[in-house]
Image (cartoon, helix red, strand yellow):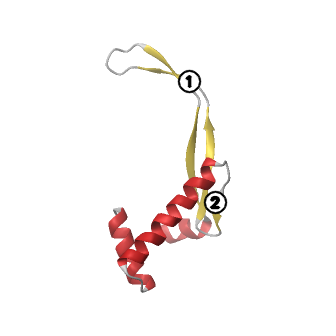
Amino acid sequence: MTKQEFVDQVADRAGLSKKDAAGAVDAFLDTVEDALKRGSEVTFSGFGKFSVSQRSAREGRNPATGEKIRIAASRVPRFTAGASLKKAIK
């Protein structure tokens, strides 16, 4: 599902115009992004949790040459599905 398809479905289900739904979806995404940048978690009971995880430095290989390279430590976004979402998917 693309972002536009998602916006269309939100508009239909919430009875909003596509412009209003797009604004709401963009506001949601911006809010989650800002919270993660600050190191906060965003939790929706039953749905899931967005958080930031620390990935440690590690050694990798350049696939073209086979040469060993050092991959730096980084922060990465994570999503953990909640119980209700897991149950709905099954």
- Mark nearer the viewer, 1 or 2: 2
Residue 20 position in % (x across, y down): 42, 77
Tag 2's secondary structure?
A: strand
Drawn side of residue 7 relative to residue 42, left or right: left
Q: Quadrant of residue 45?
A: bottom right
Q: Residue at x 46, y 68 (%)?
A: 25
Tag 1's secondary structure?
A: strand
Drawn side of residue 8 relative to residue 46, left or right: left
Q: Residue at x 33, y 69 (%)?
A: 5
Q: Residue at x 34, y 62 (%)?
A: 2
Q: Nearer the viewer, residue 71 or 63?
A: 71
Q: From the image, which quarter does the N terminus lie in?
A: bottom left
Residue 42 position in % (x across, y down): 64, 60
Identify whether 17 is placed above or below 52.
below
Identify whether 65 is placed above or below 12.
above
Residue 80 position in % (x across, y down): 59, 56
Residue 58 position in % (x across, y down): 56, 24
- Badge 1 local density, few (<14 within 10 Å), some, or many (20+)? few
Q: Quadrant of residue 31?
A: bottom right
- Badge 2 local density, few (<14 within 10 Å), some, or many (20+)? some
Name the residue that disc number 1 marks.
Answer: 58
Q: Earlier in the sequence, mark 1 or mark 2?
A: 2
Disc number placed over residue 83 in the picture, else none: none
Name the residue that disc number 2 marks.
Answer: 42
Whether residue 90 is visible here, answered yes or no, is no
The type of residue carrying mark 1 is Arg
